[in-house]
């Protein structure tokens, strides 16, 4: 059961059995995945001509203006609607969007200042909104069955549960029609969050069709550090996609209407990969920069693709990627990388110094895990010399939690692996597929716990509500990119990762799950009840 039972040697050997099942169903072996995590899945091939890299300018998503600012809180309105976008030059692509754009508009807010976002659903299917990384009361966290129905869809008859041939009923679901208010207190460390659809069984295709946007939390202490700011602070949402012959987004859904039957065709059970790398919705874009420091706030919003990023100059020199933040905000001190792995839903806040690059020089951001066209991500062209009074202080933050292993009141073990469900093959936590009517873990508000997470193949594991620290990887110290407070951790094949967290903030029903979106839709979620 996912409720904290220890993982035995028999269960560990069962992981090998799950891999055997994967091999039988055409999924890739663990050995291959260990070498190439980017292939945790199968790649679609676009049926339209693709543009050359580094020609399309990098878009920066517009910042949404509040419709009200009274009472110490900000109010926003977002309409979920169908829209057409020109993602590939000269090609029209229909999408599902927030306010008609992909990515959706960015919301910027201040620490401790509450925000209410009123969402209106004009799409043909129910939706759910989750603010990923937000410390949010359960009523606004975006539980997968708390649906926002389109107007006139008062019935509750859509498929509910991949793990059952006949669906499931969730007696605690809160279903609304047409509009819904999500309230975010944002009493949390400044960081880059993102919001996306989280409907049960259909998260992956909804994000793929465009339902994703950024939310940045700021505070005075971070503003005073002197980090690159203004035009030299760039949010970068990296996502792969593929395109059909008519310009639409290709996706191997069993039910293209995304109404009844969840899941993807068998070759894509391990995850759907695209052959076009988008940054802020543009294919392999280029951005003109000063010869100065830039703050890059990077999100991997891909369904299943992993990246290992490096910044390379025209003469082959690698620029330092100075990490200053993780999923849940600033590190205690900077960490310097040459290569930066990033799994789906992870965020990294890095500073890159372009001052040593010749004017006119091109710096490519390369994905070392990609091949062919998926090896390139984007580029920066250094256009001019400029003054730069920014800095990267040796001490970035002093408010990181200091939980110790001895603080933990319990240790839990969870195995993330492939397995069988009633409807066929799927992805399980503790041997069970997700069931909204079942409580998997119960913990008390304020408890500190250590969780051991064990993987068969690559699984980026996300906890709602809380941040955590990585304690170890298979008995060894954390990796350099594990620094800081995270809410998503990348498990590698056969690896056991220990994390520590404190379940504080709010009581209620939350989730933890794999953020390979296809795995998530095919059962790899579990319920966490904080009492």
Image: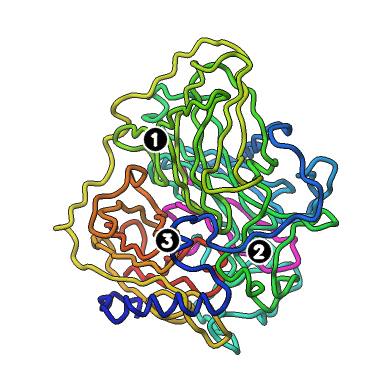
- Which mark is drawn over residue 124? none
Q: Earlier in the sequence, mark 3 or mark 1?
A: 1
Q: Earlier in the sequence, mark 2 or mark 3?
A: 2
Along the line of sight, the residue nearer the viewer: 429 or 190: 429
- Which mark is drawn over residue 205? 2
Q: Which residues are magenta?
A: 113-139
Q: Which residue is mark 1?
A: 337
Please say whether residue 144 is visible from this viewpoint.
no
Side of 316 relative to 383 (left or right):
left
> Residue drawn 47% across and 50% down?
346
> Residue drawn 56% across and 14% down?
358
Q: Label 3's element? A: strand
Decide: few, some or many residues near mark 1? Use Cα within 10 Å; few <14, some 14-19, many ≥20. Answer: some
> What's the distance in space between the residues labelled 2 and 1, CA to CA?
33 Å
Along the line of sight, the residue nearer the viewer: 214 or 219: 214
Q: Position of residue 11 (x, y in %)?
A: 32, 79
> What's the distance in space between the residues labelled 3 and 1, CA to CA?
23 Å
Residue 317, compared with residue 180, is above or below; it is above
Q: Position of residue 525 (x, y in %)?
A: 46, 71
Q: Which residue is mark 3?
A: 461
């Amino acid at each position: 059961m996912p409720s904290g039972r220890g993982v035995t040697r028999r269960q560990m050997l069962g992981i090998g059995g799950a891999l055997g099942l994967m091999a039988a169903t055409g999924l890739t072996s663990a050995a291959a995945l260990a070498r190439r995590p980017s292939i945790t899945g199968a790649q679609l091939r676009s049926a339209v001509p693709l543009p050359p890299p580094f020609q399309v300018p990098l878009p920066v998503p517009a910042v949404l203006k509040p419709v009200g600012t009274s009472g110490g809180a900000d109010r926003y309105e977002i309409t979920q609607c169908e829209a057409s976008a020109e993602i590939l030059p000269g090609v029209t692509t229909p999408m599902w969007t927030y306010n008609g754009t992909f990515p959706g508009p960015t919301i910027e807010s201040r620490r401790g200042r509450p925000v209410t976002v009123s969402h209106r659903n004009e799409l043909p299917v129910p939706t759910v909104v989750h603010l990923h990384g937000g410390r949010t009361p359960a009523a606004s966290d975006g539980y997968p069955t708390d649906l926002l129905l389109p107007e006139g869809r008062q019935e509750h008859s859509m498929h509910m549960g991949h793990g059952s041939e006949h669906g499931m009923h969730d007696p605690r679901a809160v279903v609304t029609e047409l509009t819904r208010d999500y309230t975010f207190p944002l009493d949390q460390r400044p960081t880059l969050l993102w919001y996306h659809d989280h409907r049960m069984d259909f998260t992956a295709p909804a994000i793929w069709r465009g339902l994703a946007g950024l939310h940045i939390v700021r505070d005075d202490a971070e503003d005073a550090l002197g980090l690159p700011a203004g035009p030299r602070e760039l949010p970068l949402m990296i996502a792969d996609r593929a395109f059909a012959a008519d310009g639409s987004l290709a996706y191997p859904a069993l039910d293209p209407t995304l109404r009844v039957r969840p899941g993807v065709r068998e070759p894509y059970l391990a995850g759907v990969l695209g052959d076009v790398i988008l940054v802020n919705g543009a294919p392999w874009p280029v951005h003109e920069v000063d010869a100065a420091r830039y703050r890059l706030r990077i999100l991997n919003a891909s369904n299943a693709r992993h990246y290992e990023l490096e910044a390379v100059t025209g003469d082959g020199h690698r620029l330092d990627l100075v990490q200053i933040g993780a999923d849940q905000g600033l590190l205690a001190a900077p960490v310097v990388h040459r290569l930066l792995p990033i799994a789906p839903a992870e965020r990294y806040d890095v500073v890159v110094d372009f001052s040593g690059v010749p004017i006119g020089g091109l710096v490519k951001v390369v994905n070392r895990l990609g091949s062919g066209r998926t090896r390139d991500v984007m580029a920066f062209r250094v256009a001019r010399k400029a003054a730069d009074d920014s800095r990267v202080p040796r001490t970035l933050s002093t408010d990181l939690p200091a939980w110790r292993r001895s603080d933990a009141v319990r240790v839990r073990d969870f195995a993330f692996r492939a397995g069988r469900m009633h409807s066929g093959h799927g992805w399980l936590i503790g041997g069970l597929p997700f069931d909204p009517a079942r409580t998997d873990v119960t913990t008390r508000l304020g408890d500190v716990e250590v969780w051991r997470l064990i993987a068969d193949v690559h699984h980026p594991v996300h906890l709602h509500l809380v941040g955590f620290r990585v304690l170890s990887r298979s008995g060894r110290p954390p990796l350099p990119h594990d620094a800081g407070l995270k809410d998503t951790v990348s498990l590698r094949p056969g690896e056991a990762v220990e994390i520590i967290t404190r379940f504080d903030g709010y009581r209620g029903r939350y989730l933890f799950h794999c953020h390979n979106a296809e795995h998530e839709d095919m059962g790899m979620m579990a319920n966490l009840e904080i009492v």
